[in-house]
Image (cartoon, coloured by chain):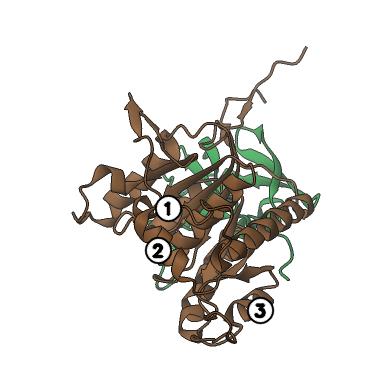
Amino acid sequence: MALKMFEQVKAPFPLAKVKNVIAVAAGKGGVGKSTVAVNLALALKKAGYSVGVMDTDIYGPSIRKMLPEDEMPSQKGETLFPAICQGIRMISMAYFRKQGEAAAVRAPIANGLVIQFIKNVEWGELDYLFIDFPPGTGDIQLTLSQQANLSGAILVTTPQEVALMDVRKAAHLFHQVNVPIVGVVENMSYYQPEGCEKVFLFGKGGGGRLAMENGIPFLGEVPIDPEICHCGDVGRSLFADEKMETSGAKAFTEIAQAFVAHLGTMKRQSVEGFKAFELVWKEMMT
Amino acid sequence: MRSPAVLIRDIRQKDNYTFTIEWSDGQVHDYRLSVLQKNCPCAKCNDEVTGKRRVDQEKLRDDVRALRVYSVGRYALRIEFTSGCSTGIYSYELLRELSNHSNK
């Protein structure tokens, strides 16, 4: 019998128990990445999925405010257990700093913290883990692309051309690192006072154009709804009042449905390949 | 719509100096480690501004081996060479280009 002279190891890659790891990114700050990540997570949780959120904005974490914890994160040895927030598992730098205290750290330290979030957090089994990306296309974004086993990315934009300029760069980054883009969400698309026509404050159709340029699905528009802002500020779910469906809640429900459908299609059509591997070199007899 | 990127379907050691990749489009290529090291894209081996090689190609050994080869995200792999070089990220695109050299 031939001796086995080499060994191929499929690495026990991080986030192995998470079915879909999804980046929520824009390349730009202020377009509503965290708002989209939180409300998409809440919409999917309401639909019966198990969901987690990883807030990787080390310098300006905002998700804890929007999604306050029912249980704080805990630690056992090197393993971190995420906070529980309305049934959603969550980790954020906000748990490790006092509110209002700046994380004055250089890039390698910030990068190290994100690697700990990837490798040391025990998420358990999840259907979806949303990684709320920080703005930009730099060190942390590359680390996440290289180490977080991303299944796909959602691009968030606002309609105006100035925002699209940066979001196009984020799209380019994901193309470079072979992370498929599930679709585009356009935030702050319009404002519609009761009984009035829609007012397109920041222009019209920018998100749709971005999707068309890249040949990717357009997942939907999120209107400017004061209730989205209010719920984020007081840490209440947009879906808490089942009797009253606001325009924001309706938009996120539809976007969540579109996201699940497009991700499913994308995964069925994608080519088969290793997610992560490690080949340990062995001495072979010649 | 962008065409789907090729991924690695299988990777295994062929002999002490070579590994084989089976790509998702069915192509199979052998990669000799010495050829890969001569084309290492890392900043130590390659001047990123001028594009010139920083390492004397004549001094690179033909019998260089690896300690391990592992994935980087969905787009590249990294090789820890026995020579000490280990920082180069070999994108799948680069590997497909180099397959012609390695297989000659």
Residue marked by disc 1: A236
Where is residue B57 drawn, in percent x and y? 47, 56
Residue marked by disc 2: A230
Q: What residue type is labelled 2?
A: His
Q: Which of marks 3 and 1 is nearer the N terminus?
A: 3
Residue marked by disc 3: A213
Q: Mark 3 lies on which chain?
A: A
Q: Earlier in the sequence, mark 3 or mark 2?
A: 3
Mark 2 neighbour density, 10 Å: few (under 14) some (14–19) many (20 or more): some
**Residue for point 29% across, 56% down:** A107
Residue in front for this viewpoint, B58 or A172: A172
Where is residue B22 drawn, in percent x and y? 74, 44
**Labels 3, 1: front one:** 1
- Could you tell me how far apart the alpha carbons at marks 2 and 1 are, in whole angstroms? 8 Å
Where is residue A92 drawn, in percent x and y? 36, 47
Residue B88 can be seen in this image: no
**Is residue B48 shown above or below B6?**
below
**Is residue A216 shown above or below A160?**
above
